[in-house]
Image: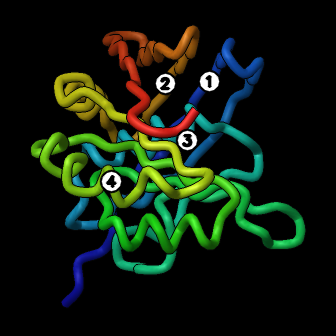
């Protein structure tokens, strides 16, 4: 019997001073049985960093041709494709051919090894942004995971403050590739 996804509810408030985006979102996240709290929370961070009413979560780890998040225009054209983790460079190149902008939020053990292996192949891709997240920061973020969450994301000068009213985490994304 296949294991079912665990459902998480997140009410998030975003104050993105860098983009001038201030909004509240009620989100439902399905955590695949093989997905960790850390990965799920990085997906939530990715949403906050690129928040838009048209941004939606993909179907998850079990679907090969969808990103973790994506944003389409009214005609169905993929405006933004977002993946988290350390995706295969062929997958990223394919995404660059399908979307106007591709964002990879890279994190985890062996990140330096992954980046050194894919960097030369990805540097030529137009519209690609690769952002590194620190291991300690994503581990702290994972500890904030709860089945029902109320989180505030304050984004200023590239730095993200995430709080749930009890705990706070500061994440400093580091751009590896892209403007």
Residue that numbered label 4 is attached to: 120
Residue that numbered label 2 is attached to: 151
Distance of mark 1 from mark 2, alpha carbons? 6 Å
In this rendering, which labeled residue sits more in front, label 4 or label 2? 4
Residue 125 relative to residue 119: left or right: right
* Residue 56 seen in the current view: no
- Residue 27 lies, with reference to residue 1, above or below; the image says above
Distance of mark 3 from mark 2, alpha carbons? 12 Å
Quadrant of the image occupied by residue 91: bottom left
Sequence-first disc among 4 and 1: 1
Q: Secondary structure at mark 4?
A: helix
Q: In the image shown, does 158 or 26 lie closer to the viewer? A: 158
Q: Which mark is residue 13?
A: 1
In this rendering, which labeled residue sits more in front, label 3 or label 1? 3
Give me the residue at 30% from left, 67% from top: 88
Dots 1, 2 in contact, CB < 8 A: yes
Q: Secondary structure at mark 2?
A: strand
In this rendering, which labeled residue sits more in front, label 4 or label 1? 4
- Residue 9 lies, with reference to residue 137, above or below; the image says below
Give me the residue at 25% from left, 34% from top: 142
């Amino acid at each position: 019997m296949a294991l079912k996804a665990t459902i998480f509810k997140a009410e998030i408030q975003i104050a993105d001073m860098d983009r001038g985006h201030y909004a509240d979102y009620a989100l439902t996240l399905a955590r695949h049985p093989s997905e960790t709290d850390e990965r799920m929370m990085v997906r939530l961070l990715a949403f906050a960093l690129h928040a838009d009413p048209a941004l939606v979560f993909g179907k998850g780890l079990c679907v090969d041709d969808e990103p973790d998040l994506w944003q389409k225009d009214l005609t169905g054209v993929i405006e933004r494709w977002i993946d988290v983790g350390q995706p295969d460079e062929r997958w990223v190149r394919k995404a660059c051919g399908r979307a106007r902008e591709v964002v990879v939020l890279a994190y985890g053990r062996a990140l330096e090894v992954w980046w050194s292996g894919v960097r030369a192949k990805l540097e030529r891709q137009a519209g690609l942004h690769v952002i590194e997240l620190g291991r300690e920061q994503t581990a702290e973020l994972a500890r904030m995971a709860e089945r029902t969450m109320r989180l505030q994301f304050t984004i200023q000068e590239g730095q993200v403050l995430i709080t749930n009213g009890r705990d706070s985490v500061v994440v400093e994304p580091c751009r590896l590739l892209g403007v």
